[in-house]
Image: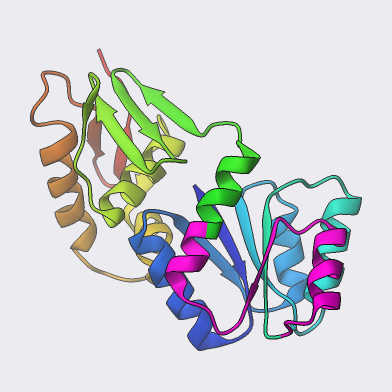
Amino acid sequence: MRLLIIEDEEKTVTALEQGFREAGYEVASARRGDEGLVLARSGDFDLVVLDIMLPRRDGWDILAELRRSGVRVPVICLTARDSVEDRVRGLELGADDYVVKPFAFAELLARARTALRRGGPEGAVVRVADLEVDFLRQRASRQGRPLELTGREFALLGLLARRRGDPLERREIAAQVWGMPRDSDSNVIDVAIRRLRGKVDDPFDRHLIHTVRGVGYVLEDRP
């Protein structure tokens, strides 16, 4: 699952990015309302976590514009404003949920999962050969056998599954799963892939995670 966070408070963004990535989600973020609206309208995300008080364009305007243009992606509004009027306004504009700051991340995560289940997005389950990746339940299995993955391992496998057949550069994986700068030079990706292969490939006859020399890695069913 891909989440978009539109929030201008740096500490909040950092905490949310880390929390959602550790829970197995791919995460992108925008600090300004106008940038967030462009990303939210792209159709690349399964859920938007939207702050209300934003520079350039506020959350109410973004939410209204998304719904006017037919974008039905689930939206959870974040705000320090907790009046009944504000809650009603958010729901009337088309928000799926409304979370008041400060909040516990565990609660936000639970609400995000509920919004995703309710929305039932297409592509919630991806299959490659006998591998099944269920993004809603954050589970993966091969030949019907559950794979015991950490949140980060699931996020890595999920990225490969979403882009199955498409070789991914190490720097793109680092940015999408770890939030690292794209110019980072680290072997963390190779170590993580090795551990993931130990769970996804090694116990089975057919391997699905392949190295693309000089590029990175790809998930695909090869003869």
Residue 97 lies in quadrant: bottom right
Instruction: Tell me which colouring the rendered structure shows.
Output: rainbow
Find the residue positioned furthest to the right: 68
The residue under the point 41% across, 56% down is 172
- Residue 69, given in percent of the width and then of the height, sits at 88, 49
- Residue range corresponding to the magenta coloring: 81-110
**Is the residue 162 above or below the residue 3 in the image?**
above
Task: Count the labels in the image.
Answer: 0
Residue 113 in sight here? yes
Residue drawn at point x = 47 percent, y = 41 percent:
136
Task: Give above or below for 182 relative to 114.
Answer: below
Q: Position of residue 81 (x, y in %)?
A: 74, 84
Give whichever of 190, 178 is nearer the camera.
Answer: 178
Q: Is residue 215 visible?
A: no
Residue under the point 32% across and 43% down: 157
User: Residue 80 vs residue 105: left or right?
Assistant: right
**Relative to residue 73, is residue 161 depicted above or below?**
above
Residue 192 belongs to the span the image colors magenta: no
94 part of magenta stretch: yes
Question: Quick check: 54 left or right of 16?
Answer: right
